Image (tube, rainbow, N blue to C red):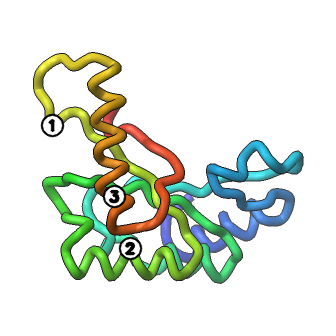
Amino acid sequence: MKFDYKNFELLLDTLLENHTSVTFPERFSLNIPRFIMRHDIDVGLECLGEIPNFEYESGVKATYFIQVASAFYNPFCPSQACEIEKLLKMGHRLGLHFDNQKDEREISEQEISEQIEQEIAIFQRYYSTVDAVSFHQP
């Protein structure tokens, strides 16, 4: 299948025929066929194009996993912050896209947990609650 906007809309329509879109906090509260739409933001929010709009128009609330510190984008600069606010206004959710690769030394699970908590705290100072965490290139 070619991945373009038309086929993305078709994918959403097909999923929604027999499933309900849920967010990470809702995933266990409903006993119905369901799916979670999620996106890892590796390069920048401007690359999303019309995808958030298609999801919104279909009633899908996606979770966008965003890095606090990325070599490609800064979620706190005005242009990226504007894109994040648009996502939130559409009802989409935010997740932390955690990258521990930037620390070249071996670190313990405890240190990773502490770093995740720190990044969540930073993120939540500017935006809404972080619903979930995904690891960048685990």
CA neighbours of label 2 inside 10 A, class few (<14), some (14 to 19), many (20+): many
N-term mark: 2 or 1: 2
SS type, badge 2:
helix
Q: Amino acid at mark 3?
A: Phe
The crowding category of the residue bearing disc 3, from other C-alpha atoms within 10 Å (few below 14, some 14 to 19, many at least 20), is: many
**Left or right: residue 90 compared with residue 42:** right
Rendered residue at 47%/54% (across/down): 130
Mark 1 Cα shell of 10 Å, populated few (<14), some (14-19), many (≥20): few
Q: Nearer the viewer, mark 2 or mark 3?
A: 3
Residue assigned mark 2: 84
Q: Amino acid at mark 2?
A: Ile
Relative image position of residue 32 (x, y in whole percent):
88, 50
User: Which quadrant is home to the N terminus?
Assistant: bottom right
Q: Which residue is mark 3?
A: 123
Quadrant of the frame with the C terminus: top left
Residue 133's disc is none
Measured Cα–Cα span from mark 2 to mark 1: 23 Å
* Residue at the disc numbered 1: 102
- What is the distance, in whole Å, between disc 2 and disc 3 at their CAs? 11 Å
At 36% from the left and 40% from the top, the residue drawn is 117
Q: Is residue 43 left or right of residue 87?
A: left
**Circle 3: element type:** helix
Q: Secondary structure at mark 1?
A: loop
Q: Verify CB contact (< 8 Å) between mark 2 and mark 1.
A: no
Q: Position of residue 63 (x, y in %)?
A: 53, 59
Query: Which of the 4 image quarters holds residue 136?
Result: top left
28 vs 113, nearest the viewer: 113
Query: What amino acid type is highlighted by mark number 1?
Result: Lys
